[in-house]
Amino acid sequence: MTREKLIQEIKSTKSFLCVGLDTDMDRIPKHLLDTEDPIFEFNKAIIDATKDHCVAYKPNIAFYECLGPKGWESLKKTIDYIPKNKFTIADAKRGDIGNTSRYYAKTFFEYMDFDAVTIAPYMGEDSITPFLEYKDKWVIVLALTSNKGALDFQFMTDLSGEKLYENVLKKTSKWGSAEQLMYVVGATRSEGIQSVRNIVPNYFFLVPGIGAQGGSLNDTAQYGWNDDCGLLVNSSRGILYASEGEDFASKAQEKAIEVQQEMEVILKDKGLI
């Protein structure tokens, strides 16, 4: 998907919501466990319930690959089912040397046909550039994450006083344009979102951390906004597990609508719609 199409989808849907498909066999409704493919049946119902209120879906690959071949089959069926006008993200957090990265890219961009994949930049340029060879596909680089362990490395400073995440942003933004690179920036670190935006003003951010993790949508928009919105804000558990009963899909829809309506207000306030 091109940047232009993504922005148009944000405008037409009046939303910049990404639904995280972190589908946990231990949490999906019990009545689905008797179906041939419980993971896909759950995802299918969630997609049907939320597709009019979001612009993107983000399966967390760990929840699928832990199930072996059956999990990969469920993931492929899920991706094939998602409407083509929705942006799809493989939350895989891959990051390896060039030759290995080429095969990861082949997996997620050719076989699975995702629009984007998350990448850990620790091994440097050759862990990212193979993904950038694909037209209209995206690399989403981990920059400033929302987890507690982010403090272990991301805020370390060099001799010039520059933080590691700042160095990552400055260096990686030279490898790919705002038409093919995004950054993961956690909503729970609202004080850092503005810092990231100052360094990469034109790039989109994938923002996890609202909902169950406690991040603020309004703070995220205040500090992370750019002229094209520049934000894909993810919610996973808050939508997926709004109910663990047979009404799970309708409750997920209610939560998605709630977030979408907040986003519509922001989009109007910012003059994008």
Image: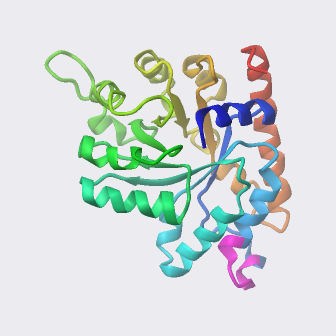
Q: Is residue 186 above or below residue 256?
A: above
Tell me: 5 left or right of 126.
right
Asked whether 216 or 102 is in front, the reply is 102
Asked whether 6 or 264 is in front, the reply is 6
Asked whether 208 or 81 is in front, the reply is 81
- Dividing the image into 4 quarters, which one contains the N terminus? top right
Q: Position of residue 228 (x, y in %)?
A: 63, 22
Asked whether 107 or 155 is in front, the reply is 107
Residue 3 found in image quarter: top right
Residue at 80% in and 67% down:
245
Q: Is residue 97 above or below residue 135?
A: below
Q: Is residue 259 above or below residue 171?
A: below
Say whether residue 270 is visible.
yes
- Dividing the image into 4 quarters, which one contains the C terminus? top right
Residue at 59% in and 59% down:
22
Residue at 70% in and 42% down:
55
Q: Is residue 49 above or below residue 190?
A: below
Q: Position of residue 252 (x, y in %)?
A: 78, 53
What scheme was used to colour the molecule? rainbow
Residue 262 found in image quarter: top right
Residue 42 found in image quarter: bottom right
Say whether residue 128 is visible.
no
Q: Which residues are magenta?
A: 32-40
Residue at 79% in and 18% down:
268
Tell me: 120 left or right of 50.
left
